[in-house]
Amino acid sequence: MNMLVCLLLAGPAVEGPAPAPHVAEQGGKDGRIHLQLAGDAIYGIGGQSYLGALLRLNAYRAMWDRGRATGSLDFGAQLAYGNEPVWLAPWLADADVQGATHRIQAVVTLGHTFHLGKRRRFSLGTHLYAGLNHWRSSYSLNYPDEGVKGRDTVTRNLPIAGGQFEFGYRLHRRVGLHAVLGGPFPTGSSYAITFFHAGLGLSFYLR
Amino acid sequence: MVRQIEGVFESTSHCRFAPALLGLALFACNEGPLPATGVQSVETFASAIMDDEYVLRIRLPPNYDAAAPARYPLIIQLDPTFVGLEQYATTVGLVSQRAAEGVWPEAIVVGVDYHDPFLRERDYVPEEPPDPAFAGEGADRFHRVLRDEVLPYLEGEYRIDSFRRTLVGHSNGGVFAWYTTFRHAPPEPPLFSAVVAADAGLDEVMFTFERWHAARSSSLPVRLYASRAVYNGATQKITFEAMVERIRGRAYAGLELATEVLETDHGGALAPSYEAGLGFALIGEAP
């Protein structure tokens, strides 16, 4: 992991100033396709509260530039995992129930980002996404006073589509802070695909 | 005690958004309830037991005549308007359609609603630990409201056959429906002769109520329809199967039990459960 971070921070070993791995700080359309990797710890609500992680690889290109703002067209892929543990469900706190609901979402994203400020350090992105949601409810239960005991797993795969906002602040040429807020478009199975997610993490400017 | 606040209503049949909470659907979008027949009205009902008002949504059959000798089955609908699921409208539409076809008998449908439908949480869920005297709050108290206030009022006001009462609920409404089933205390007749419990989450306390009933009586003269949505999770599957196995094993005298597992999600279980459950409750039609 340390090696990966060092590699990301080091950049290519070439003579002269290397091109910025993000939209040009002075603005303008540089014609380059940039790559950004973001990782966030997330909280959300599905059937109950869940915790998880989100990883997103985004390719983007500056499309317009005006004053202190540059706009980019973004395309990416996103993988998220969420876990609903029993300890986050107060109504199960006293029950002899063990297990969790797991959720994996793999989606592609498309959207636009504003890169703002004198050096384009702030970013505000709006993205739509679509893909697949895998839901797995796996629990064991024991009510000894009632002679009820069992273990079971239920799974379901569902298409998913939604939207999210992403906020960023570039701390360094290669690293920035990242926040995300989003959720799928509601359906009758929102408890399986989640109602929303919010997260905080880091961005790595790769190219 | 009772004040009529509105007159006749039309049924709806379009998609609509709904505020969502508590793991239910954020929005429900389907073909909507079937068209309603008869006359619908809304009344407020002041409960002394609860020290609060309920909203009674009442559907009377076409050609209902308060002076005629005919009496109708009564269907009590829980969660009539909760989070836009249109449960009352669904049941009214089903009864209207099937009765018009001559398949089901006509029935009076009453949705016991709230000014704030989220008050269901106060009423439907049993207290924990449960009170063997059923003198607690939660479901114990709401059962008293129905038994001692709402049903006597309705049966004094409308032409209702008190031996043909059906209670219909989904989710926590289904939890209360299960609870009411196990509140039967012979030699009194059950409060509801038929119960439709759709995709309810059965906690340990419900097994306790069942065990207490088994200790009181070997009979349970109720027509009980219970359903489970496949995609409501593993704990619901475990407890539903355990409960069905347990009550089948008791071989209660008088119990007519129909169960159904539906390949759908929690919200999707509502309409098919009500259609099958009401068919079973009203005419004994197997799901």
Image (spheres, rainbow, N blue to C red):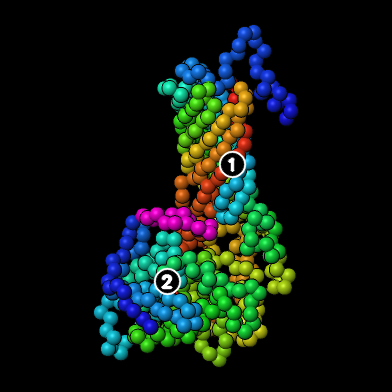
Number of numbered tags placed on the structure image? 2
Dot 1: element? strand
Check the residue under mark 2 and report the chain it is in.
Answer: B
Residue lying at 36% horizontally and 63% vertically, measured from the top left:
B33
Q: Main secondary structure of the magenta part?
A: loop
Image position of B248 (left or right of B45): right
Residue A69 vertical placement versus B274 (above, below) = above
The disc placed on residue B229 is none
Q: Amino acid at mark 2?
A: Asp
**Residue B270 left/right relative to B233:** left
Instruction: Say which residue label 2 marks.
Output: B113
- Does the rendering let one see residue B136? yes
Instruction: Tell me the crowding category of disc 2: few under 14, some 14 to 19, or many 20 or more residues within 10 angstroms, Cα based.
Output: many
Horizontal and vertical percent position of residue A33: 52, 20
Q: Quadrant of residue B216?
A: bottom right
**Pointer 2 and pointer 1 on the same chain:** no
Residue named by callout 1: A199
Say which residue appears at 60% left-offset and 43% top-offset: A42
Q: Residues within 10 Å of mark 1 (few under 14, many from 20)?
A: many
| Chain holding disc 1 | A
**Residue type at tag 1:** Gly
Q: SS for tag 2? A: strand
- Quadrant of the rendering where the N terminus of chain B is positioned: bottom left
Q: Between residue B75 and residue A41, name the one nearer to us.
A: A41
Residue B124: give x, y in percent of width and height.
53, 72
Of residue B103 and residue B4, the one placed in the foreground of this image is: B4
**Residue name at image x 59 percent, y 79 percent:** B136
Give the side of residue B252 with respect to residue A182, left or right: right
The magenta span reads B15-30
